[in-house]
Image (cartoon, rainbow, N blue to C red):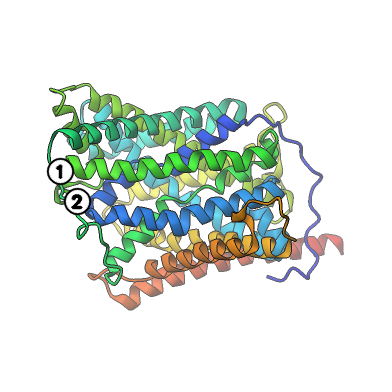
Amino acid sequence: MSAATSAPAPAPRVELPRVLTLRDLVLFNIVAILSLRWTATAAAAGPSSLTMWLLAGLFFFIPQGLAVSYLSSRLPQEGGIYFWTKQTFGEGHGFLCGWCYWVNNILYYPNLLMSTAVIATYAIGRGDTALMSDWTYILVATLTALWLAVLLNVVGLKTGRWLQNAGALGTYIPGAVLIGFGIHAALTRAAATPITLDSVTPNLGNMSQLNLWASIAFAYAGLELCAVMGDEIKDPRRTLPRSIYIAAPFIAFLYLAGTASLLWLVPSGDVHIVSGFFQAMAAGARDFGGLGWIIPAAAALYVIGNIGGIGAWLTGPARIAFVIGLDRYFPPAFGRVHPRWKTPYVAILTQAVLATVFLLLSLLGRGTTVEKAYLVLLDTMLLVYFIPYLYLFVTYLITRLREPSSAADPWWTGKGAATVIGLAGLLLTVLAMLVATVPPSDTDPWVFRLKVIGGAALFVALGGVVYWRARLTTHSDAG
């Protein structure tokens, strides 16, 4: 995709209301990144996951936060990572980055929505019952959650932000309660899972350990999401970096302390990767003589948190599709703004309709080749998802190294520190992509690689077709 060819002429600049404050962005970062299910996934792997959280935080989360903070303070325009890549590498690379970011997230919703519906059964006292696998209930619950998030975000961020804000609190409060239970247990009884120097030492020569590290890095991903709404943020050059500096420590603390609490309360061999969080909550509640209400209350907050997360991941990628529409690489309708609510409603609704289609396929196709195809798509999306992160870290390196240094700059923005930060994030991203191509032990390795690597290449090629068709259409119209 060469940037040398003339690009489609962008539409006139569209003004969007600046309604997001520092508080909104801090909560947006929390709800977009923090997911309590990762504490159970990590705890099920044993105490070495604590070291993995630290390593992923050091080599991916911190570099990601510093790179996004730096770029958003200098280029706080709508589209975020798409705009940064376009400014650095040209139109073609910008489109590829934005395309991968947008198309990946359409497949993300069904998984998050289905897990939300399952957790909701605990809120109504029906956890671990047949309701968890009742497809009629799952379908109604997931579609209701999705379209509630759509409605609130179509009517504007001034309204939709409250869903994300409530979601952040709904995620963080149960996590904080779990940590409280863990601290109480640590002061009153022995650990359910022994945490020793030997048990926290990971074996990075083991593929399952590397896979866990890549998964934990994935759990830390998402700090770039808030920056895609640059034109809707008050004082974005100052607000965006500050929101990251405030939110990131809260996120890292809850992941690390939440996993440690879960390990202390429940033996790692007994942790269920779906309901492990509630196992730990139940164990902690027993230490206080019952507290039977704590599980449904935590589940209700958890559901609110997940719906807020859906709202965040609906809002952000839709802005990228909106800006691509303004640049005329997507149909111009994507760049339309609602006359009353001043939101990119076509981009939001298109994303929601596509998410509904994939949700129906994943639910109604269970036990068929449709389900198998969907699982292959999910494996493929891991590769596609990390492509924008390659662009993020390389763009950060190039942008920083091109700019002159200033004595007033903090040490972590110096060229030497920036090189270390950018390379650390870039190398861990590459590692995560390589791990995603390693086949499970029970599958044919070559068939798996063909599907996953070939599938990712197919998505990239499909983006190329959309890109070149937009160019040809523009040249045809000009002729």
Residue 418 quadrant: bottom right
Q: Position of residue 64 (x, y in %)?
A: 53, 54
Instruction: Classify mark 1: helix, strand or loop.
Output: loop
Question: Does 219 sit left or right of 196 as displayed?
Answer: right
Q: Is residue 364 visible?
A: yes
Residue under the image location 64 percent in, 63 percent down: 415
Asked if the residue under mark 1 is in contact with the one under mark 2, i.e. CB atoms within 8 Å, the reply is: yes
Q: How many neighbours does mark 2 have within 10 angstroms: few (below 14), some (14-19), or many (20 or more)?
A: some
Under mark 2, the amino acid is Ile
> Of 201 and 397, which appears nearest the observer?
201
Q: Give the Cα separation between the discs numbered 2 and 1.
A: 8 Å
Query: What is the number of the mark on residue 191?
Result: 1
* Quadrant of the image containing the C terminus: bottom right
Q: Secondary structure at mark 2?
A: loop
> Residue 195 shows which numbered tag?
2
- In the displayed structure, would residue 43 be above or below residue 211? above
Amino acid type at circle 1 is: Ala
Q: Residue furthest bottom?
A: 446
Q: Residue at x 13, y 44 (%)?
A: 192
Query: Where's residue 251, x and y in %?
Result: 43, 42
Query: Left or right of 100: which side holds 272?
Result: left
User: Which residue is at a point 61% across and 48% down the rendered structure image?
Assistant: 69
